[in-house]
Amino acid sequence: MRWYWIDRFIAFESGRYAKAIKNVSLAEDYLHDHFPGYPVMPNTLVIEGLAQTGGLLVCEHTRFREKVVLAKVPKVSFYFPVLPGDTLLYTATIDDVREDGAMVTATCHRGSELQAETEIVFAHLNGEHQARKLFEMSDYLKMMRMLRAYEVGRAADGSPLREPSEADCLAVPKT
Amino acid sequence: MPTKEEIFQKVQTALVDALGVDEEEVTPEATLVGDLGAESIDFLDIVFRLEKAFEIKIPRGELFPEDVLTNSTYVEDGKVTEAGLAELRKRMPFANLDEFARNPNVQDFANLLTVADMCRFVETKVDVSG
């Protein structure tokens, strides 16, 4: 299976917040194991979708130079189970970004109902003792394109969000 | 301008939120790692909350000088050298390193920091009143 837990960005305000939708379908394998005859989306996968929404937002903000990974979920609350046929709206907002990581608040809604709310701590892996070759910038770019981030994205000054240039892609990341 | 008591309250809240411990456990003498169960990723979370609560900036390595502990000039055979200890004292005036200096194993360093040390650290960054 492909590890995509969001289907499309519907808003992407660089450095501030992003909104993505996730459609839950009976065509997804895991629903038939969780649970047989009573499909419920595991809330851990809701967290993963929220983390992907927030993670890509942080990544773009740091110009894809940092390897952003989900490091800690200090707090999370879930209010009802997610079922096949649901369309979820994930909203991730950046609270703070530092050299070594970022703090994001995120919510999951089904329509106007709040299904989940959480804080997510991301770490930036770029030190000598940490995995440097985990991700390529091109992987992030592929994902951003597939999720149509550049169709809805806006840069900090309000202008349309642009893909990083080839020079950005080829530049050696700072250590 | 916060008082020392106000600083303690805010540090306590930050640790309760970050570490999921009860308020009663967060006493001044409690060590972050040993008593409160903090792990390395928790320090990042704690720093975010302190920055927000006190409107200060805590540059990487200021609270926890990991660069000293991984520098071969300052560490030999898993122990911090005299030069290393001097550097740590300089970088961490808010912490009491005497106990650590008696047997300066790098591995034990993480267990050094107490809640009181964190409060003293914040005091060096804000104007304390009262």
Image (spheres, coloured by chain):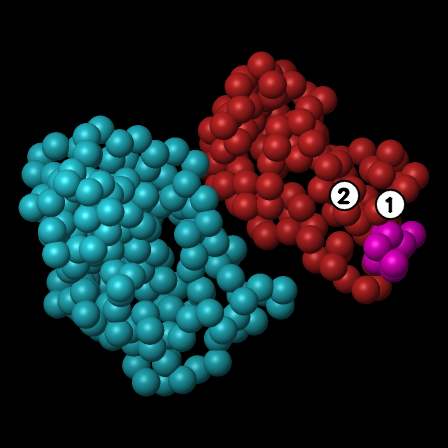
Chain colours: A cyan, B red
Residue marked by disc 2: B109
Quadrant of the frame with the N terminus of chain A: bottom left
What separation in Å lies between label 2 and label 1 (alpha carbons)? 7 Å
Query: Is A175 above or below relative to B30?
Result: below
Asked whether A127 or A82 is in front, the reply is: A82
Percent coordinates x, y for residue B86 in the rendering: 86, 49
Q: Which kind of residue does numbered mark 1 sit on?
A: Pro
> Toward the viewer: A119 or A6?
A6
Residue identified by numbered label 1: B104
Q: Chain of mark 1?
A: B
Side (left or right) of A77 relative to A80: right
> Are there few (<14), some (14-19), or many (20+) residues within 10 Å of tag 1?
many
The answer to which of marks 2 and 1 sits earlier in the sequence is: 1
Residue drawn 22% across the image and 28% down it: A79
In the rendered structure, which segment of residues is drawn in magenta? B75-82
| C-beta proximity under 8 Å, tags 2 and 1 | yes
Q: Quadrant of residue B103?
A: top right
Q: Which residue type carries mark 2?
A: Phe
Q: Is residue B81 magenta?
A: yes
Residue B65, horizontal then vertical, whole percent? 70, 50
